[in-house]
Amino acid sequence: MAVREVLKMGHPTLRVKAEPVSAEEIQSREFKDLIQDMFETMQEEDGIGIAAPQIGVSKQVAIVGVPKDNPRYPDVPEDEEEDDFDILIVINPKVTVLDKTPSGFWEGCLSVPGLRGYVERPSKIKVEFTNPLGETEVLEVSGFGATVFQHELDHLDGVLYVDRVADTTKLSYMDEFMEFHDTDIEDEE
């Protein structure tokens, strides 16, 4: 298995709706290798999720998770119990919005390195998906977890988080984000 190159904003594969994964593909050695490569790439890049299109494979599969100790997201409230879930492999997902109330977070992306943007998304969703065993799973997620799911699953529709930044004054390079927008910095000094 291998760490793969992460495609950057501007690459056409990131803007195409990904193809569904068939039941036969899920059982194939190539698909298992793809999942392993996605895990290794996500870990190498210190990400909390990755979608197959980000490594050049236009298939509806993403890895989604919110480890509580990830240093890339210091602004995530530690008391959000619903965000303490395992890393999941999500195949052919279907999302249903359960609560349209906007929930906003500063997002970053492996395919848009060096930037953060403030995005508001529905605060609670239901995700129906196939797992790597070919079984259907249903999960309800809210808060930051819902944001992470929506961010990763957007990749499967050819959408990047920068497309969802409503107020472009809340799009920032990382150095400026850390200096001017990350409220946790003041607490650490």
Image: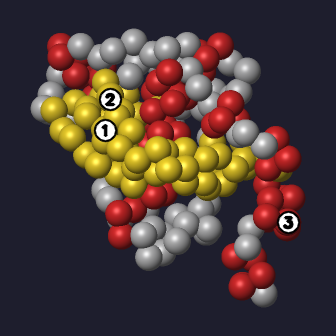
Q: SS of the residue at dot 1?
A: strand
- Which badge, 2 or 1, comes first in the chain's sequence? 2
Q: Quadrant of the N terminus?
A: top left
Pointer 3 or 1: first along the chain = 1
Residue for badge 3? 180
Kindly state the secondary structure of the residue where label 3 is placed. Answer: helix
Q: Position of residue 25 (x, y in %)?
A: 24, 16
Q: Nearer the viewer, residue 114 or 34?
A: 114
- Check the image and report above or below for 78 versus 46: below
> In the rendering, which numbered label is found on residue 4?
none
Q: Within 10 angstroms of label 1, few (less than 14), some, or many (20 or more) residues?
A: many
Q: Residue at x 29, y 17 (%)?
A: 21
Q: Position of residue 112 (x, y in %)?
A: 70, 37
Residue found at x 55% / y 13%: 16
Alpha-carbon distance for marks 2 and 3?
36 Å
Question: Taking 93 as reference, is 48 left or right?
Answer: right
Residue type at mark 3? Answer: Phe
- The three-letter code of the residue at mark 2 reads Pro
Q: Is residue 35 visible?
A: no
Residue for badge 1: 127
Depth check, front residue: 115 or 98:
98
Which badge, 2 or 3, is on the more N-terminal residue? 2
Q: Which residue is mark 2?
A: 93
Q: Residues within 10 Å of mark 3 (few under 14, many from 20)?
A: few
For mark 2, give the secondary structure: strand
| Proximity of marks 2 and 1: CB atoms separated by less than 8 Å | yes
- Residue at x-position 60% and y-position 54%: 104
Asked if residue 119 lies left or right of residue 43, the reply is right
